[in-house]
Amino acid sequence: MEWMRRAACADTDPELFFPVSSEGPGAVQREEAKRVCTGCPVRAQCLEYALESKQRSGVWGGLDEHERASLHRGRRSRLRSSGTGRH
Ligand code: SF4
């Protein structure tokens, strides 16, 4: 994917974006990853990719897995209430 070449995290340790825990050092790591995402020029593309490919872990597009799940649920709910959803 072309957008990945412009990622702000291209030269960052990938492990930063996949903390093993959501508490303690893992929480610090996750916030540090989100800070990298804040200035990323391809943040929107990254987030869409993560949502479409159902990435279950890690920080993508500045959001962790819980935040993405919440965003996904909100989108599905809006689609359903507008009558354009599939379910
Ligand atoms: S938004 Fe974050 S995880 Fe996605 S490419 Fe940019 S820096 Fe990397």
Image (cartoon, rainbow, N blue to C red):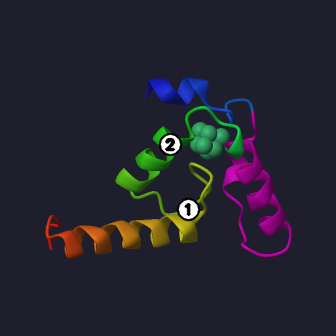
Disc 1 residue type? Ser
Dot 1 falls on a residue whose secondary structure is loop
Quadrant holding the N terminus: top left
Please identify the residue farthest to the front as the structure is shown: 82
Q: Which mark is residue 43?
A: none
Residue positioned 85% across, 74% down in the render = 24
Q: Is residue 16 visible?
A: yes
The quadrant holding residue 29 is bottom right
Q: Nearer the viewer, residue 47 or 83?
A: 83
Q: Determine if the magenta segment contains residue 30.
A: yes
How many callouts does the rendering have? 2
According to the picture, the residue beneath numbered tag 1 turns out to be 57
According to the picture, the residue beneath numbered tag 2 turns out to be 44
Residue positioned 78% across, 68% down in the render = 27
- Where does residue 4 sit, x and y in percent of width and height? 53, 30
Residue range (magenta): 12-37
Residue positioned 35% across, 66% down in the render = 75
Could you classify mark 2 by the number of other residues whose Cα lies within 10 Å: few (under 14), some (14-19), or many (20 or more)?
A: few
- Where does residue 6 sit, x and y in percent of width and height? 59, 25
Main SS category, magenta section: helix
Q: Determine if the magenta segment contains residue 33.
A: yes
- Where does residue 34 sit, x and y in percent of width and height? 71, 53
Disc 2 residue type? Ala
Q: Nearer the viewer, residue 3 or 56?
A: 3
Q: Is residue 72 left or right of residue 61?
A: left
Q: Is mark 2 within 8 Å of ligand 1?
A: no
Mark 1 or mark 2: name the one nearer the start of the chain.
2
Dot 2 falls on a residue whose secondary structure is helix
- Where does residue 7 sit, x and y in percent of width and height? 62, 31
How far apart are the alpha carbons under marks 1 and 2? 17 Å
Q: Is mark 1 within 8 Å of ligand 1?
A: no
Image quadrant, ligand 1: top right
